[in-house]
Amino acid sequence: MRNRAVHAGRAWAWVGLLAIVGFLILPDGNASAIYYDVVEFALVGAMVVGVLRNRPAAIVGWSLLIAGSFASAVADAMFDVYALALHDDSWPGPWDVAYLLGYLFTASGLCVLLLRRNRGSGYAGLVDSLLIGVACSLLSWVFLIRYIAAGETMGTLGHAVTLAYPSLDLVVLALVTWLLTTDGARRAAFQLLVAAMVAALIADYLWAFIDMTSYDPALSVGRFVSASFLLAFLLQAMAITHPGMVEVGQPTPTPATRAMPWARVGLMACAVLIAPVLLAWQALTGNGTVRDALPIAVASAAMFLLGLTRMTMLIRRLHQQARVMQQQAERLRELAEQDPLTGLPNRRIWDVALPAALARATRDGAPVSVAIVDLDHFKAFNDLHGHQMGDRLLKEAAAAWADGLRAGDLLARYGGEEFVALLPDTDEVEAGDVLDRLRGRTPMGCTFSAGLATWDGRENGEALLSRADRALYHAKATGRDRVERAEAPRPLPPQEPRTESRQAAKT
């Protein structure tokens, strides 16, 4: 269905291009004007069909864009009626109201699409587009608007209408720039919409240039400008009838780690440099006199404030990313040090905690005891009740035992149904009492066996744990549900004195 719609759109797009070529071939006159108006209204009708067929979520934005195109088509028809039928070439005329309404509808439609598309992703693109828009406004003032404002034969209404066109063009330009800085899908419909807006802006500025010079719009240049407006209509109709148009108004959150594209950085750098370049150019060509000192100063201040705003947004974004990375690092550390089932410290933490406890005991001369705790008949419990109940037993037992330990004690999961307990400042008798208390806390009517070993002051952690492990096996072999104390470590055999020592003794 989608492919069929795309192929159909391509087919009638060629028809639209042929219609534009037909307009260029037709000679000037009533027939050409009527042909132009018919093509415009036909393209507006195609836009309406596209919205009804695709049913986008952002239907308000697309409807406003269509209303803008319809208002422009009405304005062209009104102009032709007044000029060709009524021979009224007064200016400004009632068609200017429709033209200006077309600008307002178009700008409003772009705003709606942008607000939906930019939802949740911040407004960095808006600041960038405003900065570029200010730079373009300065260029427009220096090379276009100032000359229009200096006209003395237009009257107040004529000045207002004439200045409204380039001013609204700047608004549309800023919105198009913002659209280009947003994230999200940029498929055919998006590209066609941007191309339509750019074509309309180029045609507007060409028309303004023609209006300021001696070119007659009825000549070939004027016809190509009119054809550019038709091309903008066609591109917008292609965008709206394309199935991908539904993606243009969809929210597109910006990834937290997305870097600013270098193309945008370069464009913003060029925009910021426009004001000082114009200042230097006017100072050099005017013998030190700057004609547009005030507009350049205002634009420079605006771009400075926008640049400062953009830097503030970037710094805040960096701080947010730093907080997210810190939270992720803490979470990763917890996952690396925590048993995912019981929430107890895992073997990694145990392997660090035991040597540290023995080192403190060596320094302080305090006792240290360790125990290995193993749930009795855990495999049979799993087979009888299922693995989910087995997991529940492990979690409840871990919680109950950890709650029964003292401050400073450590309980860790060693593997499977085995747990290890580190009891600093605890001799063998006190450690036995602690483990007996924990046995009474074992949930679900289960029991455990434990092997207990107290540090002799010389052995390392591995040897100490090995004695506790042997005691655990002895507890299991002698009936389970008990705490077995490890045998004292065997004394080290006396070492033979080294040869040098024996020779020294003989001497």
Image (spheres, rainbow, N blue to C red):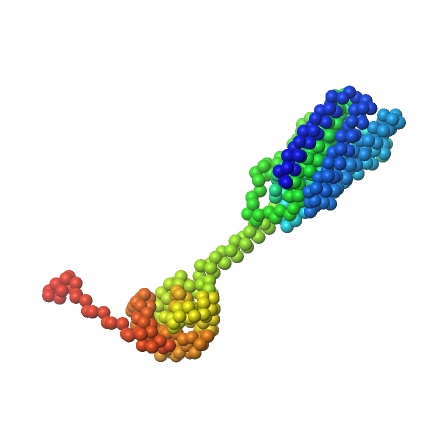
Which quarter of the picture shows residue 249?
top right
Where is residue 8 drawn, in percent x and y? 66, 34
How many numbered discs, if any? Answer: 0
Quadrant location of the C terminus? Answer: bottom left
Indicate the quadrant containing the N terminus: top left, top right, bottom left or bottom right: top right
Judge whether 333 appears above or below 406 on screen.
above
- Give the left or right position of residue 333, taking residue 44 as reference: left
List x then y, in percent, for residue 101. Answer: 79, 38
Q: Residue at x 44, y 63 (%)?
A: 339
* Residue 474, percent from left and from top: 31, 74
> Between 364 and 504, which is closer to the camera in this rendering?
364
Query: In screen coordinates, is 352 left or right of 308?
Result: left
Horizontally, residue 361 falls left or right of residue 177, namely left
The quadrant holding residue 200 is: top right
> Which residue sits at x=56%, y=44%?
259
Q: Is residue 161 left or right of residue 317?
A: right
Please name the residue shown 71% across and 35% down the image.
237
Q: Nearer the viewer, residue 355 or 302?
A: 355
Q: Whole-percent x and y of residue 462?
A: 32, 65
Q: Is residue 78 visible?
A: yes
| Quadrant assignment, res 376 | bottom left
Q: Is residue 429 above or below residue 220?
A: below
Say which of 240 and 116 sits in front.
240
Residue that appears at 71% across and 32% down: 234
Q: Is residue 276 visible?
A: no
